[in-house]
């Protein structure tokens, strides 16, 4: 335990969006030693079973206020009665691809909702000490890139016509192919390429500019791909790892977008919850956003292969060449600032984390569904997974803008 962890006992903690995947972990972590209230509208896309969500929060020892983040009156009542000292803001529409189809809704919830929350914080008679925002690496867009010689370079947006031709690489203004590098808020300015990323950047601006000079500390965590038990298996729009894990457990084929070489940095939810704890507890709130990831690059093909091996599934995965708007090619964190400014580093080893998810998916599905089909398992387990697309633009078996890609 670090010296400043004692600041996290006996506090009044508000977790906005606390019924969700990451929020539930925060509730469990904080409710044992603090008074915790969750504000969440129990979004039907995330919570098909609202009663179960409520029960989970209450079982953890927290109280649920079922309300929309845009509801000014509900926020005013909550701040007036509960007088939170720490506010975690996690409520959001979170689908990268879906944000392009449901643009207005994403802007309304993520941007207007955050503005309402900040107004409520400012109007509160007893103001909180600290507001912590769950932002996303999506604010970077393509993120840090270099050319073949290792020189930093700006990335051009990927054009639809090129993606349709099966060219998924990223190029600089002079036509040279670029390569992804670990990205940090210390040396990379935001340049989002999705509506979702743009709304997350706007959330950051609203929190820092809206509370500037108020005496309230703000901390922004830019999360990479969070995975772990508890991620909604019902929401087809988020969580590529949860989706792949479900398909592996059900022995159904896994479809991988683009050419399989999309790169992501998967960080376990327990590690992320610890990062939020550090963000709340550290004496000096970092001035710049902190990137929360492991620094480990994993292609989606490698992810699928590993899940198939660990689950024993013999169904092949299929690299389809399909793509979704707003996806980036390479997203890996530079974890050094998190260690320096928060004293945080990831602890959960990747394969152990994946095994944990597969166990949880198996347990969950044995209650709510059965595997679609059974195929013989090999002694070694797993099935080959090509790294090149098998057929360009093969029809996706998912709803439009679903998460077979990389959210
Ligand atoms: N999971 C990830 O990989 C990841 C990565 C980067 C950033 N983030 C950010 O972390 C936060 C939490 O993500 P998560 O994965 O737990 O998502 P989640 O969908 O599981 O949780 C979000 C919660 O917000 C609630 N919510 C949605 N709209 C609301 C509204 N209008 N009013 C009140 N509540 C509302 C939902 O009911 C849900 O409980 C989000 O802000 C997301 O942008 C997540």
Image (cartoon, rainbow, N blue to C red):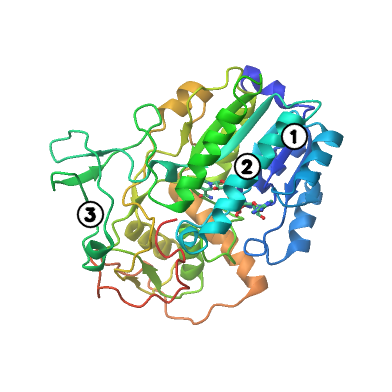
Vertical comparison of 368 with 287: above or below? below
Q: Which mark is residue 114?
A: 2
Mark 1–mark 3 distance (CA, rounded to whole Å): 44 Å
Q: Nearer the viewer, mark 2 or mark 3?
A: 2
Contact check, label 1 and label 3, Cβ < 8 Å? no
Circle 1 packing at 10 Å, graded few (<14), some (14-19), many (20+), is many
Contact check, label 2 and label 1, Cβ < 8 Å? no
Judging by the rendered image, the residue that carries numbered circle 3 is: 169
* Closer to us: 333 or 103: 103
Q: Residue at x 27, y 54 (%)?
A: 158
How far across and how far down the image is residue 278, in percent?
Answer: 59, 28
Q: Nearer the viewer, mark 2 or mark 1?
A: 2
* Closer to us: 299 or 208: 208
The answer to whether one can see residue 65 in this image is: yes
Q: Residue at x 69, y 35 (%)?
A: 119
331 sits left or right of 42 in the view: left
334 sits left or right of 289 in the view: left
Mark 3 falls on what kind of element? Answer: loop
Judging by the rendered image, the residue that carries numbered circle 1 is: 13
253 sits left or right of 134 in the view: left
Q: Earlier in the sequence, mark 1 or mark 3?
A: 1
């Amino acid at each position: 335990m670090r010296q400043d962890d004692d600041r996290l006992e006996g506090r009044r903690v508000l977790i906005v969006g606390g019924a969700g995947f990451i929020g539930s972990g925060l509730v469990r972590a904080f409710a044992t030693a603090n008074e915790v209230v969750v504000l969440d509208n129990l979004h039907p896309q995330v919570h098909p079973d609202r009663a179960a969500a409520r029960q989970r929060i209450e079982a953890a020892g927290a109280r649920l206020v079922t309300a929309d983040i845009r509801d000014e009156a509900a926020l005013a009542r909550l701040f007036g009665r509960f007088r939170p000292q720490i506010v975690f803001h996690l409520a959001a529409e979170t689908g990268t691809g879906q944000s392009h189809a449901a643009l207005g809704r994403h802007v309304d919830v993520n941007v207007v909702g955050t503005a309402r929350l900040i107004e409520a914080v400012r109007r509160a008679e007893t103001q909180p000490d600290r507001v912590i925002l769950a932002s996303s690496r999506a604010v970077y867009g393509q993120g840090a890139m270099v050319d073949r010689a290792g020189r930093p370079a700006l990335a051009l947006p990927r054009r639809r016509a090129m993606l349709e031709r099966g060219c998924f690489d990223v190029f600089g203004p002079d036509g040279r192919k670029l390569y992804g590098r670990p990205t940090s808020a210390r040396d990379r300015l935001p340049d989002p390429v999705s509506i979702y990323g743009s709304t997350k950047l706007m959330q950051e601006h609203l929190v820092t500019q809206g509370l500037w000079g108020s005496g309230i500390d703000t901390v922004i965590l830019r999360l990479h791909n969070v995975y772990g038990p508890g991620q909604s298996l019902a929401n087809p729009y988020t969580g590529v790892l949860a989706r792949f894990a479900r398909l592996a457990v059900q022995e159904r084929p896994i479809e991988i977008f683009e050419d399989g070489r999309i790169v992501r940095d998967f960080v376990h939810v327990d590690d992320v919850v610890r990062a939020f704890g550090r963000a709340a507890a550290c004496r000096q709130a970092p001035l710049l956003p902190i990137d929360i990831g492991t620094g480990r690059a994993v292609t989606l093909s490698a992810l699928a292969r590993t899940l198939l091996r660990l689950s024993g599934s013999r169904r092949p995965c299929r690299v389809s060449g399909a793509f979704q708007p707003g996806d980036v090619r390479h997203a890996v964190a530079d974890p050094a600032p998190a260690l320096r400014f928060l004293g945080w580093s990831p602890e959960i080893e990747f394969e152990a984390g994946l095994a944990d998810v597969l166990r949880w998916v198996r347990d969950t599905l044995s209650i709510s569904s059965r595997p679609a089909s059974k195929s013989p398992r090999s002694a070694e387990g797993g099935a080959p997974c090509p790294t090149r697309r098998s057929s360009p633009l093969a029809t996706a078996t998912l709803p439009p803008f679903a998460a077979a890609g990389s959210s």
